[in-house]
Image (cartoon, rainbow, N blue to C red):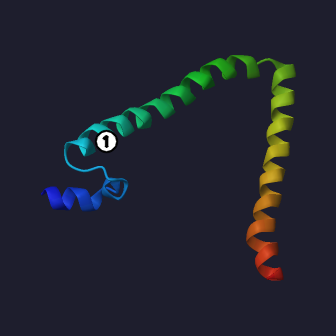
Amino acid sequence: MQNMLTKSIQFPSADITGAAIVFWSFILAIFAFGAPTSYSLAGLVLGKQVSRPGVFYVFNKLMAILLVYVALMIAYEHVLTPLLA
């Protein structure tokens, strides 16, 4: 069982073995819980602000600009660069 556990988790490559795997798995579980929780709390705070029309307008424009930027970067990196290579 020990051998199967260390092969299925990538901790041994970082010299984490034995009981330390349980400890670091617990830490990772806390982080996995913390990320969605912090997103939820940020959503509660920002949701109240974005409900105001002026803030919503600015937020909407900012998100649109970021969306176009990401689309252009993806097109450049994954379409244009391979075509020119």
Direction from residue 16 to residue 65 in the image, left or right: right
The N terminus is located in which quarter? bottom left
Camera-nearest residue between 49 and 5? 5
Q: Residue furthest left?
A: 1
Residue appearing at x 30%, y 49% in the figure: 16
Q: Position of residue 6 (x, y in %)?
A: 24, 57
Q: Secondary structure at mark 1?
A: helix
Could you say which quadrant of the image residue 75 lies in?
bottom right
Residue appearing at x 82%, y 34% in the figure: 60
Direction from residue 30 to residue 82 in the image, left or right: right
Q: Amino acid at mark 1?
A: Ser
Could you say which quadrant of the image residue 30 lies in?
top left
Direction from residue 45 to residue 29 in the image, left or right: left
Q: Position of residue 58 (x, y in %)?
A: 86, 29
Camera-nearest residue between 45 and 17? 17
Q: Is residue 84 above or below residue 23?
A: below
Q: Position of residue 17 (x, y in %)?
A: 24, 50
Which residue bears the numbered disc 1?
Answer: 25
Residue appearing at x 83%, y 22% in the figure: 55
